[in-house]
Image (spheres, rainbow, N blue to C red):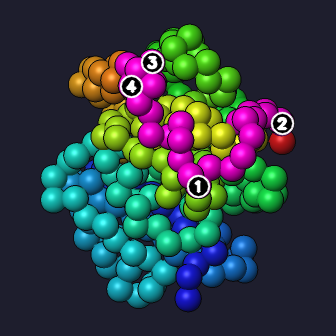
Amino acid sequence: MTPALSLVFPVWNEQENVESLLETALATGRRLGRPFEIVVVDDGSSDRSASLVASKGRSHPEIRVVTHPSNRGYGAALRSGLRAARGDWVFFSDADLQFDLNEIDRLLTHAEDFDIIAGVRTPRRDPWGRQLLAWGWGVLVRLLFDLRVRDIDCAFKLFRREVIEAIPIASIGAFVNTEILVRAEHAGFRVHQVAVSHRPRLRGRQSGARPRVLLRAAVELATLSRELRAGTAAAGSVGHAPAGSARTEVRGR
């Protein structure tokens, strides 16, 4: 049976969080009362993340595991998960337990009217330095792509399957969220934003602000900007995209 909903989670060295994540994801999927699957992408973890997920999967057929032999990057892991997902709707979030998965209801409420429903962390509970970087990144993205989306990198998003099938995803790093939204808007997909809760990370280490990650994101940003300016963006002429111009709306809870 084709699942109605896929829950996708990229994982890298999250042994302290991944078991709780899967328990919550299973409970959330069952509560929603529709066929679902959980797709976990282990991105070359050097800790026990992969074995913990595999163990859980043996007793829960809803869990599917995609394994990268080596660490390829957040974008590459997310791309693998989105490609593996079979659901009519595809949701993704991170494995760090900073989001309340039960708030997926806030996204599903708008599923009939939009193609992408994206969370906005309200308020965001990351260290101030990380928030400052995110603010600067948002300004840069707005200037380059005219993307009127708040909290671009919020890892709490729901996609209609057609979006995943229609747009190419080239990013292997942290730029992936921006790339998906930029390409989706260029293809005419409708984007809606909803406020979601956010918690501080209690266990494990954040990796998104490492210099190597930031440099890779900057390179990928420049590459997409050149591509769109040259008029070669594949998303601009995708046959699956709905007619009409893109719409981005932001609403509260």
Image-quadrant location for residue 49: bottom left
Asked if the residue under mark 2 is in contact with the one under mark 4, i.e. CB atoms within 8 Å, the reply is no
What residue is disc 2 on?
A: 252
Gap in angstroms between the C-alphas marked 4 and 3: 6 Å
Front-most of 96 and 179? 179
SS at mark 1 in the image: loop
- Residue 9 visible, this angle: yes
- Neighbours of disc 3 within 10 Å: few (<14), some (14-19), many (20+): few
- Give the Cα separation between the discs numbered 4 and 1: 20 Å
Local crowd at mark 1 within 10 Å, few (<14), some, or many (≥20)?
A: some
**Which residues, given as a range, are shown in magenta?**
225-252
Residue pictured at 62% horizontal, 35% vertical: 185
Question: Tag 4: residue type?
Answer: Glu
Measuring from the top left, give residue 197's x and y in whole percent. Answer: 69, 42
Q: Which residue is mark 3?
A: 229
Q: Secondary structure at mark 3?
A: helix
Front-lying residue, 16 or 180: 180
Secondary structure beneath disc 4? helix
Q: Is residue 196 visible?
A: no
CA separation in Å, label 4 and label 2: 34 Å
Q: Are marks 2 and 1 in contact (CB under 8 Å)?
A: no
- Counting residues from the start of the chain, the first of labels 2 and 3 encountered is 3
Measure the C-alpha gap from mark 2 to mark 1: 30 Å
Q: Nearer the viewer, residue 6 or 161?
A: 161
Which label lies toward us, 2 or 1?
1
Tag 2, which secondary structure? loop
What residue is pinned by disc 4? Answer: 227
Residue carrying label 1: 240
Q: Quadrant of the N terminus?
A: bottom right
Q: State the CA–CA distance, disc 3 to disc 1.
A: 22 Å
Q: Are marks 3 and 1 in contact (CB under 8 Å)?
A: no
